Image (cartoon, grey):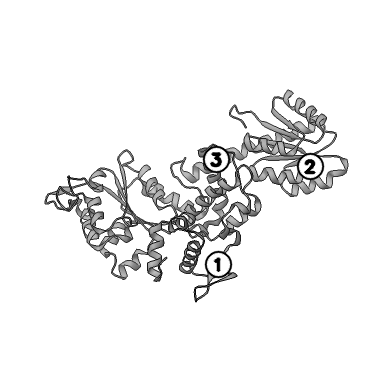
Amino acid sequence: MNKAGQFCIVVVDDEERAVTGLVELLRLEGFVVDGYSRPQAALDHVRRHPVDLLLTDLRMPEVDGLELLRLVRAVDPGLSVVMITGQGGVRDAVAAMKAGADDYLIKPINLEELEITIARIREKRELLAQNRLLREAALRGSTEFDFIGSSPAMEKIFRAIRDVAPTMASVLIEGETGTGKELVARSLHRSGLRSEKPLITINCAALHEGLLESELFGHVKGAFTGAVRNKLGKFALADGGTIFLDEIGDMAMSVQAKLLRVLVSGEFQQVGGEKTHYVDVRVLAATNKDLRAEVAAGRFREDLYYRLNVVQFILPPLRDRSGDIVMLVKYFCEKISRRDQRPLLYPESEAMRLLENAPWPGNVRELENVMERAFIYAKDRPIGVDDLPLYLQENRYVQKKEGGSEEPGEKFTLVGLSLKEMEKRMILAALERCPTKTQAARELGISVRKIEYRLKEWGRSM
């Protein structure tokens, strides 16, 4: 429906007289109707305007009804389509319904039958719209969460957020890069008792040990070279509210000890200062590491781990909730269309299959980046396979030989690989394809720091 709530219909028939007659008839019934004798013009209309129902002739010389059905559904998967056919085309009309058409009408069109068909489709669309709103409200807590998903794993996350948000418990959020750890933290804060107070975020992996301590707790003038004035730290800024410590698994042991003190007593001292400060802060932390393993390896304090891990969220990777991919793709397409004021595009069926079957090591963030790229390359047409990154088109990556030379055409698949091996191959392949680490990181939906960390771990330099 359009903004005025009117039911919008598009009529397509290569016979202009038939189009004119049907358009005039439907307008008398109070519908907003546009008619076209060229299917391409109708398709352009669907791309640019809200349409509820497409009434199209089945047999047309330029583009037949079945092909038009495929094209419009790529633009708007929810568009209702009714085929119009002659007496001898019933078999084709039934085939069209099997392909996804909602109904068919036989020429000459009976007015009463037309009205009944439209009324039935209108009622169905209104019911689907109501159900969608109710479902979205249930899944997202009436838009309280910035998540999209209907899988059991995500429903469990939504329920946990509602249960934990109105408490003061410390929370540890674990999950791979790009799974939405910061979104969980923001949802916990926004739905919590301190939503009117600040949420202060800091990435512990982005700063070296000395600078991280200063950022967290502040410093006094002259504490170190460059400390030309007193500075408040993140904890002081978050007093009365919430602090989110992202990538806490990368925090140095010396800083961990000072963080533990804040968690136990609310006390801290600024770098270079002697005065003890007190804060009342809720602590949320996130990591893409296995902190239990880090504790066992002596890289993370056990007492701090248990202080943080009062409540634990483990976010599922996208490959474990592939049923949410279609919903996520639709959401990103609509988001990009609104933001960039561009026609709303959706992937064609083959492109969607590739998206659903991809391993997504960069998770939801990688999927969003892929859709951003696809919108750029698709311009104003449905998103096709060619608009997706090459590594998704092939679902495999060029593998270098042990000697370092690349064998043309030699490929490897990701089937049967462990997560770590999959990540390694994808990062190395992206670095082969992309001229810079920054571009490779953007394509994979991860940080340059993450790539550099992995290269160091693998004993490689690029």
Quick one: 122 or 147, which is closer to the camera?
147
Assign a secondary structure to mark 3. Answer: helix
Using the rendered image of the protein, determine whether residue 328 is visible from the camera's viewpoint: no
Assign a secondary structure to mark 2. Answer: loop
Whole-percent x, y for residue 424 in the image: 46, 67
Q: Is residue 74 left or right of residue 298?
A: right
CA separation in Å, label 1 and label 2: 41 Å
Q: Nearer the viewer, mark 2 or mark 3?
A: 2
The residue carrying mark 1 is: 398
Q: Quadrant of residue 50?
A: top right
CA separation in Å, label 3 and label 1: 33 Å
Query: Which numbered disc, 2 or 3, marks the residue that appears first in the sequence?
Result: 2
The residue carrying mark 2 is: 62
Q: Nearer the viewer, mark 3 or mark 1?
A: 1
Q: Quadrant of residue 209?
A: bottom left
Q: Nearer the viewer, mark 1 or mark 2?
A: 1
Query: Which numbered disc, 3 or 1, marks the residue that appears first in the sequence?
Result: 3
- Specify the farthest residue to the left: 274
Query: Which numbered disc, 1 or 2, marks the residue that appears first in the sequence?
Result: 2
Q: Is residue 82 left or right of residue 329?
A: right
Quick one: 400 or 293, which is closer to the camera?
400
Residue type pointed to by label 1: Val
At x 42%, y 65%, the residue is 462
Using the rendered image of the protein, determine whether residue 249 is visible from the camera's viewpoint: yes
Residue type pointed to by label 3: Ser
Q: Which mark is residue 337?
A: 3
Whole-percent x, y for residue 261 in the image: 20, 56
Residue type pointed to by label 2: Glu
CA separation in Å, label 2 and label 3: 29 Å
Is disc 3 in contact with disc 1, using a CB cutoff of under 8 Å? no
